[in-house]
Image (cartoon, rainbow, N blue to C red):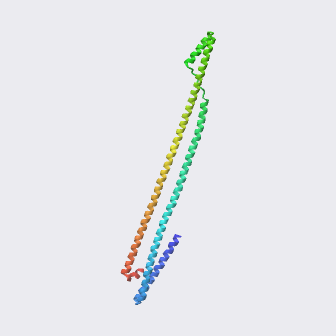
Amino acid sequence: MAANDIAMGVTEDSAVQDFLQILEEHRRNCEKQGKYVEAEIAKNRLDELREHEENRRREAMRSRQIAERLGVEEAHMLEFQQFNALWDKRMAEFEQKSADLVQTMRERHQAEINEYLRQLQQEPLKRPKFSKELLNLRRIQQTLAKQKQYSEAHKVKLKGDNLEAFELEKMRNQHQVRMQTLAEKFKAKQEGEMLALEKRIESGREEQKKQRQMDLERLLQRYQNVKTELESQQNIERIRSDKFSKFTNRRKNDRPWETGAHAR
């Protein structure tokens, strides 16, 4: 489509120039033949056509430059949309992978704590280490029994049994406390591991955001550079076009008799 438009524009320009040349030759012939009225009409028509052609050329340049700027804007918007789509996908994949890592660790931790608690529950109580008081009562009990002082031996035995039950309960409680302490330490270790993972994920997330912002700034800078370069080129083109128009008009006004020669 663009190639066809350019070809049509070149053909139209050529036709206009041909017509201007024919009209200029007609004016010059009328001037030579003394047909000044017809020469004046031809001159006025030439001025109108030249002005019209200049306006048409200027409008064509303006339209083309607008199309060029719109093309840059559209290309930038497309690149910006693709940029956001790519980064949205990349960050979504990061979040999914992070969630998978957390879930995997959570499941592993649950399996590990279950196994650890099972092992703790199966751990037998340590061999009781009774107090000196209880051991002394048992010696007294045995001595009294050997001396056939059964009534006294029975009293000492009851006292020893109560003390032994107390000390065994105390040992069981201490064992339970020890098991609970070990389990809490194990859980604390797991929590530390999970916290470290979450920190790594957060660090990765911030790095992703930082990289996205850096890439966005580079994209915007590229767009600004292209836009500035295009504006500069178009401004130069407009200045050159204006200078050419002024130069052409000045030559036409200063040496109108050469117009036909230059046209040929």
Residue at x-position 48% and y-position 75%:
10
Q: As drawn, which residue projects farthest toward the top?
A: 147
Q: Is residue 141 left or right of residue 68?
A: right
| Quarter the C terminus occupies | bottom left
Q: As drawn, which residue projects farthest toward the left?
A: 254
Residue at x-position 47% and y-position 70%:
64
Whole-percent x, y for residue 75 in the image: 50, 62
Residue 63 lies, with reference to residue 183, above or below; the image says below
Whole-percent x, y for residue 190 in the image: 55, 38
Q: Nearer the viewer, residue 150 or 82?
A: 150
Residue at x-position 53% and y-position 58%:
82
Q: Is residue 206 left or right of residue 156?
A: left
Residue 104 seen in this snapshot: yes
Residue 29 seen in this snapshot: no
Q: How many marks?
A: 0
Residue 230 lies, with reference to residue 58, above or below; the image says above
Q: Is residue 214 left or right of residue 157?
A: left
Name the image quarter holding residue 28: bottom left
Whole-percent x, y for residue 163 in the image: 59, 20
Residue 131 lies, with reference to residue 49, above or below; the image says above
Whole-percent x, y for residue 73 in the image: 49, 63
Residue at x-position 56% and y-position 33%:
183
Q: Nearer the viewer, residue 260 or 140?
A: 140
